[in-house]
Image (spheres, grey):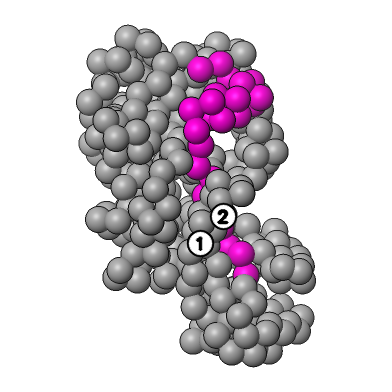
Amino acid sequence: MLLTDDAPTVPQTVDPAFRRDIIEGLSRSPKATPPIWFYDRRGSELFEAITDLPEYYPTRTETALLEKHGTDFAQAVGEGRAVVEFGAGSSRKTPHLLRAIAPGAYVPIDISGDFLRASSATLAQAFPDLPVIPVEGDFNQPLTLPDAIRAMPRLGFFPGSTIGNMEPDAAVDLLRAMRRLLGDGAMLLIGMDRIKDRDRLIAAYDDATGVTAAFNLNLLTRINRELDGDLPIDGFAHRAIWNDDKERVEMHVEAVRPLHFHVAGESFRMAQGETIHTESSHKYGVRDGRLLLRSGGWEPVREWTDADGLFSLMLTQAG
């Protein structure tokens, strides 16, 4: 059953945080924008398409782990917890977890409201006896959980190695915020992508059919639409690189010619070859991942990984 107090959707003014982040990011040297702004409705749809690509191993590897280890999750987590999913998206992986642990409620959190409501309604149909309570919001900002789960123990669910999109200090801050939000006695099940062969990593972020490129460039389309921009989309190209020093894949949009454009009344120039850094995806060694979690207030309890060591699911307890 879907529980929501949302009012009917009405046209809204431009999100001031979006305007601020984009203007500040384009004013920097080098230019960089936060990855949360990828996820308008079209961006969310394109990301779901990325997860089905043959090059993109994280989703199918993590899904296989969720399918395989349901009994382990049930034993470690117990029944009746409210599952709070951060950045729920389409919630495609979530049913495997919900079937395994018999939760008391499901609270998906996502910044894309339309996408969130649609996916929540679909999941509520699949689990008619489970309270599904969507929360529209940015999990990087302070949130309040629904009163309906106040008395329930909580299990945070943060799949997809989304933690890797953050710089280490910001990742620690987010983990600490999750710890505060979920409360004492909470657990967190988190996906973490592992360091591996460079060519395999680059292929996952620069697929042969160009879906990831479309996802990256869609941010520019959103800027034009919502911030009265005139960025020439054909003046940019998608780039994915491996930064060995920082152990991360970086996504950029690169100017293929000298550019002059406007956003929200501000004027910007880019030289040919200059880039806007739109996302990082940090990869973790086993010790690095555990250190990050402990720094964020979570003590690792169990870990599950695939035979090739591509990806791990880690269950942690609030420290």
Q: Does the magenta stretch include residue 302?
A: no
- Viewport quadrant of the C terminus: top right
SS at badge 1? strand
Residue carrying label 2: 243
Q: Give the range drawn in magenta.
A: 276-300
Q: Quadrant of residue 291?
A: top right
Return the residue nearer the eye: 52 or 154.
Answer: 52
Q: Position of residue 162 (x, y in %)?
A: 49, 43
Q: Quadrant of residue 63?
A: top left
Q: As shown in the figure, which amino acid type bears the numbered disc 2?
A: Asn
Note whether 156 is above or below 40 in the view shown: above
Q: In this view, does 173 lie to the left or right of 156?
A: right
Above or below, comparing residue 193 to residue 36 in the picture: above
Can residue 142 be seen at all in this image of the molecule? no
Say whether residue 290 is magenta.
yes
**Label 1: which residue?**
241
